[in-house]
Amino acid sequence: MPLGVIRSEESPEETRGLTRSGDLSKMLPIEARLLATGNKDSVGRKLFMARRAERMLLSYERAGWVDDQPSRVTDRLELRPASEMGPIIVCLDTSASMLGARETVAKSLTLECMRGAIRQQRKCIVFAFSGPENIMEMELDMGSESITKLLSFLTMSFSGGTDVDAPLACSLERLGREAWNMADVLLVTDGEIPPPNEDILAKLNIAKEELGLTVHGLLVGQRITEPMETICRDPTGTKGSTISVFQSWGVVDDSTRSL
């Protein structure tokens, strides 16, 4: 992999905002006032020492870009690789359990994801799926008509059963192509899916280990289900959870909710 740059506190070139820390050199003057009040037994000084011990001093957030190898594990680090960002594969659940608000939210999130791919000039494909024989695909191009075609595609729903094997198999087939082997997969669903086929799951784990694949789960349901944990689990155990749960139901019109 070519060298890239990664944001690091070891190179404090700019102030990005405010954060909490135990670093005296970065704390705000308001914290220093506590330290300066009274003698060593004063309430202010004791409060300051407690806040420092807990790394809760209000501080300037200072960082800069340093040369490093591009990495797929971002966690709490902001990464800007020198090479192009990889493609995106979206698997969108349009089964019967998604009808109503869940499907509306899922399609809205998918639309925004694919709009971002266009802005970043990233290859992107969406697989809309339901039952074993219900799967359709749309690959975005960088033309001006892409969003219009995508909006038309997203009006389609199968509203049948749920078979997650088909979209995962299609995703694995894409990963086998040279132009797509750096892609990540985003699975948008309510989590009400059956366990994946053991053969599909084995191939998925191989892709995770050999290609650095990450399967991100975006749940528009109420709980993280075991099949989702199985699909999104890191086989090496070095990464944290890659499942996010949509929780902003308060902004969804009550008349469209079907939870």
Image (cartoon, rainbow, N blue to C red):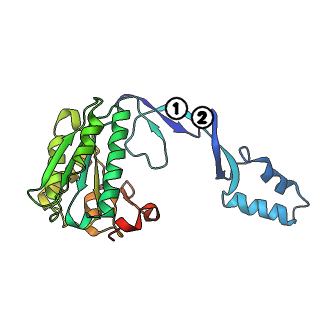
Could you say which disc has been placed on residue 21 in the image? none
- Corner quadrant of residue 238: bottom left
Q: Residue 89 vs residue 254: left or right? A: left
Q: Residue 80 vs residue 132: left or right? A: right
Neighbour tally class for label 1: few under 14, some 14-19, many 20 plus, Cα within 10 Å: some
Could you say which disc has been placed on residue 66 in the image? 1
* Front-lying residue, 61 or 25: 61
Find residue 14 and report its horizontal and vertical position in percent.
63, 34
* Residue 59 makes an appearance in the image: yes
Q: In this picture, is 223 found above or below 122? A: below
- Are circles 2 and 1 on residues that touch, CB within 8 Å? yes
Q: Which residue is mark 2?
A: 11
Q: In this picture, is 166 found above or below 230? A: above
Q: Which image quadrant: the C terminus? A: bottom left
Q: Secondary structure at mark 1?
A: strand
Find residue 198 and report its horizontal and vertical position in percent.
14, 61
